Amino acid sequence: MTAVRTAPASPPVAVARPQRRRSPARRREALAGYLFISPWIVGFLVFTAGAMTYSLVISFSHYNLATNTARPAGLSNYAELLDDPRVRTALGNTLFYAVLAVPLEVVVALGLALLLSSLGRGSGLFRTIYYLPKMTPAVATAAVFFVLLNGSTGAVNRFLGAFGIDGPQWLVDPAWVKPSIVLMQLWAVSGTMVIFLAALKNVPRELYEVAELDGAGPLRRFFSITLPMISSAMFFNVIVLTIAAFQVFDSAYLLFWRDQSNASPEASLFYAVYLFQQAFREFNFGFAAAMAWLLFVIILGVTFVQMRFGNRLVYYEGDR
Amino acid sequence: MAVVGAAGARPLPPAVVTGSAAGTVAGTPVGRHPRGPRRRVARVVLWTVLVLVGLAFLYPFAWLLAASLKGRGQVFDNSLWPSTWHWSNYATVWDELPLVHWMVNSIAIALLAAFAVALSSSLVAFGFAYFRFPGRGLLFGLVLATMMLPGAVTMIPTYLIWKNLGVLGTWIPLFGANLFGSAFYIFLQRQFFLGLPRELFEAARIDGASYWSMFWRIVMPLSVPSFVIVLLFEFQASWNNLQAALIYLNAGSVEQFTAPLGIAYAMTRYSPTAGGHGDYQYVMVASLVVTLPMLVLFAFGQRYFVEGVATTGRKG
């Protein structure tokens, strides 16, 4: 070992251990390692740690964009936050949306994944078709659904009408604003579906064979084998989808806040939209930064709760 | 970008990497008993449902294509076959909207963003995968933790950084941060690098190769598949990025817009509220043109997209 060279006087047996850590080869390796990760370190210091600190400072100040100065404002931004009824509206809308969207996305994605996986051979073509919406830019999806969801002439209501259902005024009626966006999300749910597909593929087939021999029906097999075996993928999807739901922006912005023609300004005010408006339309940087921190704390809290409960429900094969 | 790390969660079972993308093994044993009338009925029901769902997924594409060829007002008739074919819509859009500018801007930015993040993330990932150094575990945990951070928290300071550097109005804010790697891709690449046999590197060391040449001569050539996954993911993410374009390009001239910002602009410009049914067919032309590159990308890289989602969805 190279370590020996550094301490020629002492007997080799004694040297090897304590000197090992400081050997030049080790130091060179560590240095090289730091150099390789240095882009990330710089980026982290500037765009994450630095930006977070600065964002926190701004949230406690009134920022003047013209002079680039942050005048200390104490807690006033946060006080304003709690007073602003629109923050409450936005938060309520976003929570409502998340509660509606996440379970539906999970159920639909899992349903599609089960369909595809029970087909076995030949599922490739369907998987391709199901994945296409995921490739469509959100702007194009919004532009198309803007017309498809039209209350009187849209294809969705025409379709419902064929079954005698009088479809709602999707993008106008405040009660249907969130379901409209959920519907668009569901059209592009295939990313989640693919994760479920991969998880389903890893369920050992012997389990099903044994269960079938024991007389377990399809439902029993699903709840006793499939669901526990894919619970970690389920857990992952729920957490990721929840975090995404809290930040929903593109579709809400495009369908409602692009111009002044918003038919449902109360129901369509999502947190990320209001935050964006405060930051880059009103240039209320202090207020917007405070909003961002509130969002961060909420997301952290929700994720923490999900993990506490999730870890109890999730079955990890590696754990025994 | 998706949050993968979910810091604190226990690792999933060791990754059985997705392998061949094609054949999906049956999750339920329906497929293994083709005989028997009940099985056959189940099979027919299954195929019917699959086809119906497929049609529901495809309908908006067919609708979009048809609508882009319709005349004013016909867009709302929902027919998939235009009663009169207006090929001139495409020429009109070509004249009225700087669609070519938008496409060129978006392609250039997406390429810059994709290569910047793929290269920097690979470097960083190699650092984490191969080298032993004090604080490695802690730093990698930090990498994963940054995935939990909502973009909104750093949005304003990031804007101020670019403003103070005097690069507002350029493309730099739209890809600059990508030069420093991105947690999601660092994680992805590190997983891949950890799977490379370590003997390869030891052999190269004995031959006197530097770490730098190991990276370029061994790591990069062997990790082309995961590199492509990163490129494709980031290209798509950049292509879709509306919010950054709204922040950094909205104040500029229309020619400087990216594709998503351009569509948002077109939606307003041809808005039905601007009079009657508006000229929504032009918005559809633009939407179709903006979607096409993604479909082409998918046609060539389907395997990478699907495997990428599947592998990163499991922590491996």
Image (cartoon, coloured by chain):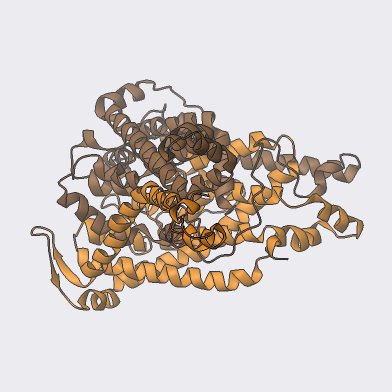
* Residue lying at 15% horizontally and 65% vertically, measured from the top left: A63
How far from the left and from the top, in percent, is residue A11?
Answer: 53, 59
Comparing A105 with A210, the one in front is: A210
Q: Is residue A149 above or below residue B223?
A: below
Note the chain letter of the orange one. A
Specify whether A120 is left or right of B184: right
Specify whether A9 is left or right of A50: right
Count of numbered marks = 0
Q: Is residue A59 above or below residue B181?
A: below
Q: Colour of chain B?
A: brown
Specify whether B218 is left or right of B96: right
Comparing B193 with B151, the one in front is: B193
Among the 4 quarters of the image, the one containing residue B156 = bottom left
Q: Residue furthest left?
A: A67
How far from the left and from the top, in percent, is residue B286?
Answer: 36, 32
How far from the left and from the top, in percent, is residue B250?
Answer: 22, 44
Residue B67 visible to an observer of this rendering: no
Specify whether B309 is left or right of B23: left
Q: Is residue B273 above or below residue A290?
A: above
Among the 4 quarters of the image, the one containing residue A86 = bottom left
Comparing B106 with A316, the one in front is: A316
Residue B227 visible to an observer of this rendering: yes
Comparing A243 with B143, the one in front is: B143
How far from the left and from the top, in percent, is residue A68?
Answer: 11, 60
